[in-house]
């Protein structure tokens, strides 16, 4: 057989087919390795806030020795953003903003920000929250004021270095206003005990939360609004049956 004037024998054909098979196999191998490499790179760059959200409520209890300890409870199990928020466009805004600006979250789109905070308010006030609010305030509560805001912080390794520059899961922080003054005190935060070292970043986040609330309180009303405040104050109404 002749191709472009070249005589190709059966042996030549076998060699060409073998070579072509080898090239295809090598191409498949390289493509697989490249795909796995890209997956690892994307995972390292992926902000974990894109996958989960948790509601954390914070309380402070005084130990027998007089020291204060931070206690944390989670409202239910972590859920995906798509399960928590009803609007796909809102999820997209949250993912983008959390990746760009870790910390207390304020969406640049005012409508999206208000939607995010409204849905959080509905989660916190939609059921009988008596036990949780008792925990947050450290005493029996009845229609108490409660602060909440969303936060996303960069994860870190145990040595304090950044963990692939990832953003940890989105956290809906719930805090009693009565704790703000002490949480805003950096010396108090340094003394505040935790059950294990993994909770230490929570103290720093609570300090950020308290300072932000104090900043908002100092602003004139004209410069504040539901579509811009990172922290909202709501009244969580709890029902108590009288026997």
Image (cartoon, rainbow, N blue to C red):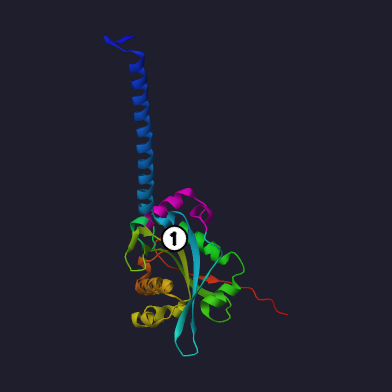
Looking at the picture, how far across and down is residue 136, in whole percent?
Answer: 52, 76
In the rendered view, does 234 fall on the left or right side of 105? right
Q: Secondary structure at mark 1?
A: loop
Q: Quadrant of residue 140?
A: bottom right
Q: Residue at position x 39%, y 55% from top?
A: 47
Where, quadrant-wise, is the C terminus in this rendering?
bottom right
The residue at the far left in this view is: 5
Looking at the picture, how far across and down is residue 73, in whole percent?
Answer: 52, 71
Query: Would residue 108 be visible to someone looking at this image?
Result: no
Foreground residue among 81 and 219: 81
Looking at the picture, how far across and down is residue 110, in whole percent?
Answer: 40, 56
Q: Residue at position x 48%, y 48% from top?
A: 88
Magenta range is 79-98
91 in magenta: yes
Q: Residue at position x 35%, y 52% from top?
A: 45
Where 122 falls versus 83 (above or below)? below
Prevailing SS of the magenta stretch: helix
Q: Which residue is mark 1?
A: 169
Query: Would residue 17 be visible to someone looking at this image?
Result: yes
Q: Quadrant of residue 205?
A: bottom left
């Amino acid at each position: 057989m002749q191709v472009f004037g070249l005589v190709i024998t059966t042996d030549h054909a076998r060699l060409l087919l073998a070579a072509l098979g080898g090239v295809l196999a090598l191409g498949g191998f390289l493509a697989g390795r490249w795909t796995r490499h890209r997956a690892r790179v994307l995972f390292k760059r992926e902000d974990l806030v894109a996958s989960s959200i948790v509601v954390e409520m914070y309380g402070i209890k005084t130990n027998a020795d007089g020291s204060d300890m931070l206690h944390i409870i989670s409202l239910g199990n972590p859920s995906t953003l798509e399960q928590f928020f009803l609007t796909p466009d809102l999820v997209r805004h949250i993912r983008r903003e959390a990746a760009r600006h870790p910390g207390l979250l304020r969406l640049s789109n005012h409508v999206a920000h208000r939607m995010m905070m409204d849905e959080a308010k509905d989660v916190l006030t939609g059921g009988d929250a008596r036990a949780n609010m008792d925990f947050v305030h450290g005493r029996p509560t009845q229609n108490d004021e409660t602060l909440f805001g969303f936060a996303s912080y960069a994860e870190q390794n145990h040595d304090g270095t950044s963990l692939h520059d990832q953003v940890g899961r989105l956290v809906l922080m719930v805090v009693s206003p009565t704790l703000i003054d002490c949480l805003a005190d950096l010396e108090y935060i340094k003394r505040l005990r935790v059950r294990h070292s993994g909770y230490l970043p929570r103290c720093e986040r609570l300090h950020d939360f308290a300072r932000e609330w104090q900043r908002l309180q100092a602003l004139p009303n004209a410069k504040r609004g539901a579509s811009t405040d990172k922290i909202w104050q709501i009244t969580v109404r709890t029902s108590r049956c009288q026997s």
